[in-house]
Amino acid sequence: MTLAPLLNAALPIQIHAFAAMALMPLTVVIFSLPHGSDLHKRMGWAWATLMAAVALSSFWVHDIRLVGPFSPIHLLSLVALFSLVGAIVAIRQCRVARHRKIMLGLTWGALAGAGVFTLLPGRIMYDVVLAGLFGPAFGG
């Protein structure tokens, strides 16, 4: 594993990737805490801020272009941002089950699901995580 490809990438890509990587252990911690505790709430705000940073920074990442400079990942980013708002509104209305459902959807869809696609050959995170094991993608 080497961070060199990521450290040599454009700033929006670095922000996007490092915020997403910070979300992974934070997610485990939050799900391990007693729900509704002060620490869960504080960590939850940190999680929401990082997820918003991941989603917002994606609008400056244009490695895959399908419609002008945009790709399906940008649609996922919009869904993530609206979901974050929905989760916050739900918990403020004491709709815990709705909040939980949205947060699990964000975790599995926007974080884990989208994260898997970053490991495809030709992507920066493939070079960071897997190139040392499987060699450079496409003989590059």
Image: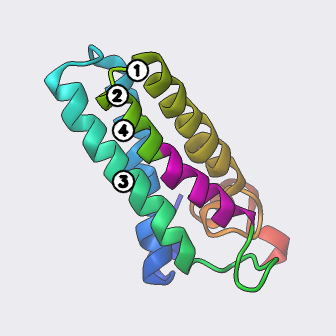
- How far apart marks 3 and 4 lie (CA) works out to 14 Å
Which dot marks residue 83?
none
What residue type is disc 2 on?
Ile
Q: Extreme left residue here?
A: 38
- Marks 1, 3: nearer the viewer: 1
- In the rendered image, residue 69, in percent from the top left (x then y), is placed at 70, 84
The residue that disc 3 covers is 50
Residue at 44%, 72% in the rendered image: 14
Q: As drawn, is 11 to the left or to the right of 30?
A: right
Do the CB atoms of the residues marked 2 and 4 lie less than 8 Å apart? Answer: yes
The reply to whether callout 1 and callout 3 are in contact (CB within 8 Å) is: no
Residue topped by disc 1: 95
State which region is magenta. Answer: 72-83
One can see residue 3 in this view:
no
Q: Which residue is identified by label 2?
A: 91
Q: Which mark is residue 88?
A: 4
Spatial CA distance of label 1 from label 3 is 23 Å
100, 89: nearer the viewer: 89
Question: In the picture provided, is 95 more to the left or to the right than 10?
Answer: left
**Callout 4 environment at 10 Å: few (<14), some (14 to 19), or many (20+)?**
some
Q: Using the image as rendered, state which of residue 113 and residue 99 is in the foreground.
A: 99
